[in-house]
Image (cartoon, rainbow, N blue to C red):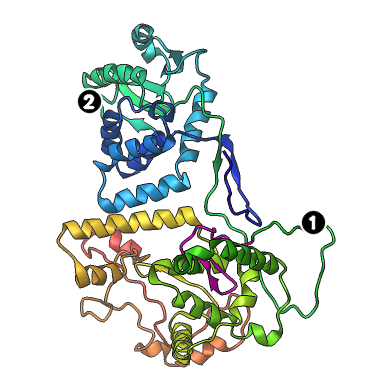
Amino acid sequence: SSVKADSKAITTSLTTKWFSTPLLLEVSEFLAEDSQEKFWNFVEASQNIGSSDHHGTDYSYYHTILEAAFQFLSPLQQNLLKFCLSLHSYSATIQAFQQIAADEPPPEGCNSFFSVHGKKTCDFDTLETLLLTASQRPKPLLFKGDHRYPSSNPESPVVIFYSEIGYEEFYNFHLQLVSKSNAGKINYVFRHYILNPRKEPVYLSGYGVELAIKSTEYKAKDDTQVKGTEVNTTVIGENDPIDEVQGFLFGKLRDLHPDLKGQLKELRKHLVESTNEMAPLKVWQLQDLSFQTAARILAAPIELALVVMKDLSQNFPTKARAITKTAVNSELRTEVEENQKYFKGTLGLQPGDSALFINGLHIDLDTQDIFSLFDVLRNEARVMEGLHRLGIEGLSLHNVLKLNIQPSEADYAVDIRSSAISWINNLEVDSRYNSWPSSLQELLRPTFPGVIRQIRKNLHNMVFIVDPAHETTAELM
């Protein structure tokens, strides 16, 4: 079979140094961050899901896992879980558990194994013997991310179980360990362990390539570049409903003239090849480029506006010449200029700067990445769901979210104007300070380092809250 697909100009992929981790384990870590109770409930619910090999396709495996997880999540959290899986946010967490297991190291040929105060086995009968001598050995160091099953006796021996959830062997051991933990005989701790990881890399998300444009008064030629005409620089594919090349909407043209598909394909190919060379633009053509780009995005159908924006952003140098031919509506220009003025006054944003706000929180685009952004979204989702459960909705919800709940450095403040305050020395009122200047201009007067300035102002106030009848009060004063 042969497949015809659009070729891309540049495709960049970044991969991790470790192999891919099962999605089932990543979902369990997502739930564990909410609560350990949800983690253990998911472990019970995901019996015999196993690996993607058991499901025919990765797609059906993915949906089986989501089905098991969704019963513990709200609709908002379900969307966040899908986002998290697309980023493989918890792949590194699973790899950390793998490294901890490798340091043990695991007994040979065991899919699962137990560690009791440093001694290891993969046989449940031997576990009983190790428990008898456990008190003679020091307890192991536990980590923040370990999954601890609720125990009725914290002083009992610690059994660390290394295994991969979703398999029958894991559940057989798990049930026996749970019964021992409930009886108060052990403290049950679980860590992920995969005996044979799939030899596939994890593709990193959240990284991009930036191409800065500038006035091209001179033309630099790179003679190391291979010249080719078969490269298609557009990200939007031939079969996309929008498929815009040099101002022609081929998606629409194919719908209007289905009999001309062959000729349209040839025209599209010609236009794509002619746009491959990034011809330099004149300075005057660059002046309105941002307005023209905004106009092009707004002119697209609402449901395709984000697709167009993504295409123009990612392929801007090759699209720029076509964009310069776009006419800008005077209303759009006025609106953008008013927005620029408003954002400059309120947020200090210069024209051309970008800013991101989530529920009114300003996200610094220079320091944040997609993973920290995901954490912000998750925290905000928790707050909003909590408020929603309390019956706070609509405008009230927005007003509560605007409140500043950051803890101040001081736990409380004392109003020193109260009559309960007895002044020991009041710089502004006491006669002994009459000779001191009262102007704050004195702060600007040059003086020797370390000299305390004499100003008749109570710039700093120290308030002692004391019991006058107590013997140590006099010493303190």
Q: Main secondary structure of the magenta part?
A: loop
- Given the image, on which type of amino acid does mark 1 rest? Val
Check the picture and name the quadrant holding the N terminus. Answer: top right
Q: Indicate which disc residue 226 carries.
A: 1
Q: In this orientation, does residue 305 appear?
A: yes
Q: Nearer the viewer, residue 285 or 386?
A: 285
Q: Residues within 10 Å of mark 2 (few under 14, many from 20)?
A: some
From the top left corner, tell me how far across and down residue 463 is, in percent. Answer: 32, 71
Residue found 73% across the figure and 76% down from its top? 280
What's the residue at 54%, 24% (across, down)? 103
Whether residue 280 sits left or right of residue 138 in the image: it is right
Image x and y of residue 337, in percent: 48, 88
Element on which disc 1 rests? loop
CA separation in Å, label 2 and label 1: 70 Å
Q: Amino acid at mark 2?
A: Ser
| Mark 2 or mark 1: whose residue is earlier in sequence | 2
Determine the image quadrant of residue 264.
Answer: bottom right
Task: Name the residue: 42% across, 12% down.
Answer: 122
Residue drawn at 21 percent across, 80 percent down: 419
Picture mark count? 2
Position of the C terminus by quadrant: bottom left
Residue stretch rendered in magenta on the structure: 233-251
The residue beneath circle 2 is: 152
Tell me where residue 71 sits by quadrant: top left
Q: Nearer the viewer, residue 204 or 63?
A: 63
Q: Which mark is residue 290?
A: none
206, above or below 278, in the image? above
Q: Is residue 451 above or below residue 7?
A: below
Q: Position of residue 105 (x, y in %)?
A: 53, 19
